Amino acid sequence: MKARTRKEYYNVVAHFTKCVGHDPYNLSLEDTKKFYEDLIKKINNEKLSYSTAVMRYSVMRSICDFIENYRINHGEEYTNYFREFSLPEQDKTIKEEDLPSLKEVDLVLNKCLECNDYKAFTIFSLCLKLGLTNTEVCHLAFENVLLVDDEHIAISLTSSGNSSRKITRILELDKDLSEILDKYIKDYEITAGPLFYNNRGNQIKMRDTERLLLKYIDMINTEGSETVKASPKTEAKTIKASKKSDTKLVIKPFTMQSLRHIAMIMLLKGNVSKENVAKFGGITTKWMNRYERIVNKNDVDTNGEMSILSIKTGF
């Protein structure tokens, strides 16, 4: 390791020690959260650049990886909790106009069904209602699927890493999404391993899902025959459908992350607390204001469900 790199690592550990009161050799989840939130606070107060914050967090994750391997090899327990978090993307402001409308998302879901691509329909539906990250949906395996009762399925999401003490969150699916996932598993005869594969027969990757989404957006834009209208496939139960239009719709390309953003917003619109939405989405409440800014523009009544989005299963 170069002298400059050693100095940088030393300074980062010094910042961590000053923040939590001790070095990272004994690391707790609370220590990690405190350091994480301190970085975010400094970014928001413009006392630390985003790139520097990312560097510090990356250094701590690497150092604690080394400590974890060392202690486990010597018969001791240690959990690198830095693997359980990641700093959000730099631009934390989400503008409503930058997100696709529900009608546009609905057109994509309909197009998947028209093309008999139930895999794409299922992937997009999971992200749209559960707010899964692209990484999470790509890494889903049959072993993550849990049976709650005759009508509901749940999925478990466990943090990555080699530690035996991992953080797991379990998300129960609404009836509509349970039916969608159950049909997909049966139709594609998934009995073990990854839920989703790419055309090459390998576990699907993030670039595969992004290309898949863009494929259907491009297909709709190329055909140019879709109209702006409300559809029964996807609807916000408490949002009135706009007047029908004969104008041809051109969908502005959006990403898998956009579907996650919509999911988080819809949970808040259903009057789920920001603390529960943050826990549901695997993030901290520090970043919930980005969604609340959009939600507060609208008066939306609660209907007692986790998400106000309802997706028809396509069969």
Image: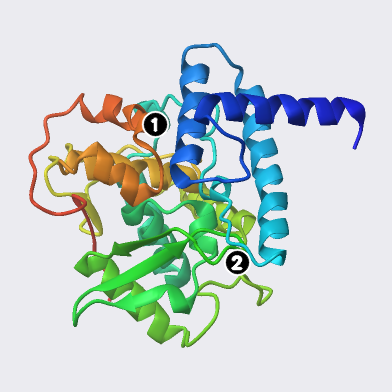
Type of amino acid at the residue the image marks with label 2: Ile
Point 27% across, 29% down: residue: 292
First in sequence: mark 2 vs mark 1: 2
Q: Position of residue 180 (x, y in %)?
A: 32, 72
**Quadrant of the rendering where the C terminus is positioned:** bottom left
* Any part of residue 228 in sight: no
Q: Nearer the viewer, mark 2 or mark 1?
A: 1
- Please state the total of marks drawn on the protein image: 2
- Image coords of residue 257 (percent x, y): 47, 44
Q: Is residue 169 left or right of residue 195?
A: left
In this picture, residue 174 sits left or right of residue 196: left
* Callout 2 secondary element: loop
Three-letter amino acid code at the position of disc 1: Trp
Vertical order, 111 against 62 (above or below): below
Of residues 142 and 242, which is closer to you in this image? 142
**Left or right, residue 117 beside residue 312:** right
Q: Position of residue 269 (x, y in %)?
A: 19, 39
Q: Residue at x 70, y 43 (%)?
A: 63
When asked about the image quadrant of residue 97, the answer is top left
Reply above or below: 128 against 189: above
Q: Which mark is residue 204?
A: 2
Q: How is the image coloured?
A: rainbow
To which quarter of the image does residue 125 belong? Answer: bottom left
Residue at mark 1 = 287
Quadrant position of residue 126: bottom left
The residue lying toward the viewer, choosing from 185 and 50, is: 50
Q: Where's residue 283, x and y in %?
A: 41, 42
Q: Label 1: how many residues lie within 10 Å, few (<14), some (14-19) or many (20+)?
A: some
